[in-house]
Image: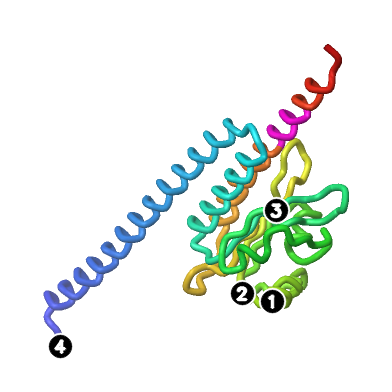
């Protein structure tokens, strides 16, 4: 029969390992939060300085960079809604298909991105191909494999501007509500910037065409 001291030593060793694991998790969480806050600060400041379409593309590209990095995903895209044609357009793409996908158009009723744009609600699909809303169309056309994804709407003044989508979290890990909340905030900043630019350009056009 073991001495009571041996039980105590083993218990203390197990507790020590558990506490070390908790400390590591808290440290990682703190670092992720600092990255998150820094990204939001950069995007907020950039949104205030939007003055041209070139600046806007840069902002959207930065938004996608932060979204992919902070969600630890391999690919992602910003799709803007073309109200006239009722299509989603790949405006900014990060990942292997960046050069091929940009400018590609999808009917707004296609896939999870279309569902999100139509229903104005985010979606987590950690087994994307088992989700009834998923469309394999883009995967088949561009020889890509979507395993998991998060997609959120970009909304400004109660209007859907587009969606942000990130794909395939690192090491096969699942996306979480934290990823959704992050993308919703990034999407709100980007949508507000889009609306600011639209109003500014309209005002400039009105000024340039008004009689002197």
The local secondary structure at tag 4 comes to loop
In reply to whether residue 77 is colored magenta, the answer given is no
Task: Give the residue displayed 70% in from the left and 53% down from the top.
Answer: 163
Q: Earlier in the sequence, mark 2 or mark 1?
A: 1
Residue on which the image places disc 1: 129
**Between marks 4 and 3, how big is the CA–CA gap?**
64 Å
Q: Residue furthest bottom?
A: 1
The local secondary structure at tag 1 comes to helix
Which numbered marker is on residue 1? 4
Residue on which the image places disc 2: 147
- Magenta residues, start to end: 195-202
How far across and down, in percent of the image, does residue 54 sit? 63, 41
Q: Earlier in the sequence, mark 4 or mark 2?
A: 4
Which numbered marker is on residue 177? none
Mark 2 touching mark 1, by CB under 8 A? yes
The local secondary structure at tag 2 comes to loop
In screen coordinates, is 172 left or right of 191?
A: left
């Amino acid at each position: 029969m073991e001495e009571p001291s041996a039980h105590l030593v083993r218990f203390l060793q197990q507790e020590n390992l558990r506490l070390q694991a908790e400390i590591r998790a808290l440290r990682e969480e703190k670092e992720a939060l600092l990255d998150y806050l820094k990204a939001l600060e950069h995007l907020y400041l950039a949104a205030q300085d939007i003055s041209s379409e070139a600046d806007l593309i840069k902002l959207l590209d930065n938004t996608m960079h932060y979204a992919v990095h902070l969600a630890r995903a391999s690919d992602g895209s910003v799709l803007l809604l073309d109200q006239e044609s009722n299509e989603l357009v790949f405006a900014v793409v990060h990942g292997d298909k960046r050069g091929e996908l940009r400018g590609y158009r999808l009917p707004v009723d296609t896939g999870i991105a279309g569902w999100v744009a139509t229903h104005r609600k985010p979606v987590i699909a950690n087994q994307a191909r088992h989700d009834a809303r998923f469309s394999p169309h883009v995967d088949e056309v561009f020889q890509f494999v979507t395993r998991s994804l998060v997609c959120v709407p970009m909304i400004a003044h109660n209007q859907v501007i587009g969606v942000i989508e990130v794909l395939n979290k690192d090491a096969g890990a699942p996306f979480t509500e934290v990823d959704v909340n992050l993308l919703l905030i990034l999407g709100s900043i980007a949508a507000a910037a889009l609306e600011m630019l639209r109003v500014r350009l309209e005002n400039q056009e009105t000024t340039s065409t008004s009689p002197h």
